[in-house]
Amino acid sequence: MAIRQLPTFSNLSPLRLVGLGLVGLHLELIGQVTGNPDQFVLSGLFWGAIAVQVHHHWPARLPRSRPFLLLGAALIGGLILRSWHLGEGESAFVRLFPLFAWAGWFSMVQGWRWLPWGQSWALVLALSVPPRALPLLLETIAGGQICNATAAIAAFGLHYLGFDVVHQNSLIQLPEGIVNVEFACTGVPLLGLLLQVSVLLAVVTQGQTVGRLVGWSVAIAALLSVVRVAIMAVVVSDPTAFQFWHGSSGGQIFTLIALAGLGYLGLGRLSQADVD
């Protein structure tokens, strides 16, 4: 099997340079508009995987379709002009930037030829999905049921560990105080992130099905949300400890644990299979 060499900067085609410029602009917008380091790192990983796909599928001869070249140039030009007048509250534009940037760049590179770029499109779509899309949908459909189920499982776990606990709907009562499980405390917001990473892992590993990774994501998000709610119920009488686990610091810890667990299941087990 022939291995394609990575192009050096001096012999990059103009279209590849345009692609690199769009990636840099997107990362710059994340830093200026959202200031979210997690989004910056995740976007960098996605763009890296997309760059690998582009390198593997780069056509030996670019199409000469003037309509698609004009369409792509118009999309990219519009994005650049819009980026110059962007305010701090326009995070939706930053989130959708990869989709329109990729569509414009892809039109210039491939024209109407869509194969074999399915995985690249999957990565772009996963990167462009708003992080609140899944939580808003599930909160509308079954928000109360999810809160009640999370509280019930956490209360059962505390009871099993010997705590004097009373559960009613989304309330968990211990002698030290009461915790009300709100939707933000469930694992659904974390699940949205894990599903994005699942698409990335499925493309990178080439050996894990999306369905399996989705199943692991649901299990990890549900388990960690129950553990976090149980911890908050135990420390509810200590305002400092409660605010730590309820706030962004505690959330970051569980996010890192979730990503590490999903990464191990997606990458670690694949490595073990290669060794066997």
Image: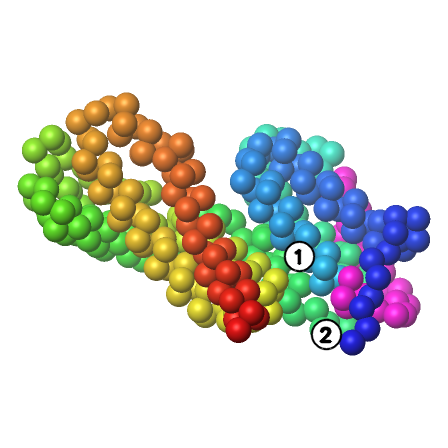
At x 72% / y 59%, what residue is drawn?
Answer: 52
Q: Is residue 269 left or right of residue 61?
A: left
What mark, if any, has residue 155 been given in the picture? none
Mark 2 Cα shell of 10 Å, populated few (<14), some (14-19), many (≥20): few
Q: Nearer the viewer, residue 53 or 74?
A: 53
Can you identify the residue that label 2 sits on?
115
Q: Which residues are magenta?
A: 55-81
- On the image, the x and y values in percent for residue 270 come to 53, 67
Q: Identify which residue is drawn at 78% across, 62% down.
A: 55
- Secondary-structure class at tag 2: loop
Residue that appears at 10% across and 42% down: 163
Mark yes or no: residue 78 visible.
Answer: no
Q: Which residue is mark 1?
A: 49
Quick check: is 66 in the magenta stretch? Answer: yes
Is 221 within the magenta? no
Can the viewer see residue 219 in this picture?
yes
Residue occupying the point 56% across, 36% down: 37
In depth, the one of 194 and 75 nearer the eye is 194
Q: Are marks 2 and 1 in contact (CB under 8 Å)?
A: no
Q: Secondary structure at mark 1?
A: helix
Tell me, what colour scheme is on the image?
Answer: rainbow
Dominant SS in magenta: helix
Q: Is residue 55 above or below residue 174?
A: below
Please name the amino acid that badge 2 sits on.
Leu
- The Cα atoms of the two marked residues, 2 and 1, are separated by 17 Å
Left or right of 223? Residue 85 is: right
Q: Quadrant of the N terminus?
A: bottom right
- Percent of width and height locating residue 210: 50, 68
Outermost residue on the right side: it is 10
Image location (x, y in percent) of residue 148:
20, 51
Name the amino acid type tagged 1.
Ala
